[in-house]
Image: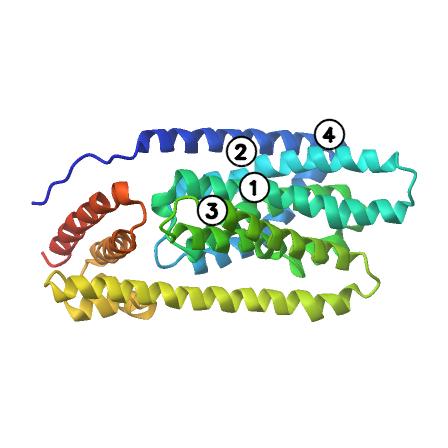
Amino acid sequence: MSTWAPVPEARRSVQVLEVLGIGLGAAGVLAVVTVIGASAGVAGTTTAGLLAFIPLAVVLLGIRWVDRWEPEPHATLVAAFLWGAGVATAISLIFNTAIALGLEQSGRSPFWQLVVSTAVVAPVVEEVTKGLGVLGILLFRHRTFDGPVDGVVYAATVAAGFAFVENILYFAQYGEALAPVFFARAVMSPFAHVVFTAMIGITLGIASRQRSRLSWTWLFPAGLVGAILLHALWNFSTLSVRYVNLYFALQVPLFVTLVGLVAWLRTREAAVLRHRLGEYAAAGWLSPAEVHMVASLGERRRARAWAGSRGRRREMAAFQRRATELAYARERLATGRVPVTAAHDQARALHDLTDARRALYA
């Protein structure tokens, strides 16, 4: 049986940071919901929260569709969601409110104040706070951040948390016009925040595949600018009397483009699996049929169904998961990323795959 040295990276420190992030995010959610409840009451806040779960469920299903090849660690996803729901919303609420009050003292027209606060201040504050959460995952969880697809998953999760609490705020605040507000936010634009913050996730995903550990210092600002511009364009369009025309002319094509981009990125992930696992097949660790099965979502489903008919579904799922982990560990080692832990990760993943294969074919 293979052995390896202890992991150089301080995993326990990373786990402590995740726990602290979850606690901080939960405290932020509680604080924001308390503020909402103080003005809308318990009944209004409860109704708003239940309604906000509807677009949240749709967004989470979309994230699950993206995160099919290598599901991210649950604790990290929970921390990402709570960062968006608690930390980003609390900070944004404080800054947006303070700046809006300052604008009221400027003496400018109410419409000018509305444009500045909606199309300038809010996009900058909100995308910075959300983006810092995604950047934190890259810096502290870089061994689970394997490319643009992972970046989209983490960014979308942060954005989903932010949009969830923001929807509670809007649904509670505009209770007298709840139907049109719900339609505008939950039906027409449930993925709006996801689209904005995905720009940060994609660029940080590109950074995760660079040899330089400092590549995020220029790729993060690039993604942040893209997110802010898209957010500003969206918010400005909502102030126009031709909002519906702009929605179908700009926002719908933008969303469709992002979906197409993510679908293409998923095919690139399949190519990485096929190439890296093919190297192990050439060395005799895997069969070509196994490589083909792991590198195809359709073949994965058929393989699990076949294994399930023989009481081995759990073992097949474990084999597929371990093979995927091995492919990404090999990719990190071959491309020179995370050099301190890449060799260890590959040895551990190969050991785990051997055990999973043995259990599957026992």
Q: Which mark sits nearer the N-terminus, 3 or 2?
A: 2
Instruction: Tell which tag, 4 or 3, sits nearer the viewer.
Output: 3
User: Where's the N terminus, which quadrant?
Assistant: top left
* Residue underneath mark 2: 25
Asked if disc 2 and disc 1 are in contact, CB closer than 8 Å, the reply is: yes
Tag 3 secondary structure: helix
Q: Nearer the viewer, residue 137 or 58?
A: 137
Examine the rendering and report whether any part of residue 42 can be seen.
no
Tag 4 secondary structure: helix
Tag 1 secondary structure: helix
Task: Kindly identify the amino acid type of the residue bearing the numbered disc 4.
Answer: Ala
* Residue underneath mark 4: 38
Q: Which mark sits nearer the N-terminus, 1 or 4?
A: 4
Task: Kindly identify the amino acid type of the residue bearing the numbered disc 1.
Answer: Gly
Task: Kindly identify the amino acid type of the residue bearing the numbered disc 3.
Answer: Trp
* Residue underneath mark 3: 216
* Residue underneath mark 1: 84
Above or below, comparing residue 151 to residue 96 in the picture: below
Instruction: Tell which tag, 1 or 4, sits nearer the viewer.
Output: 1
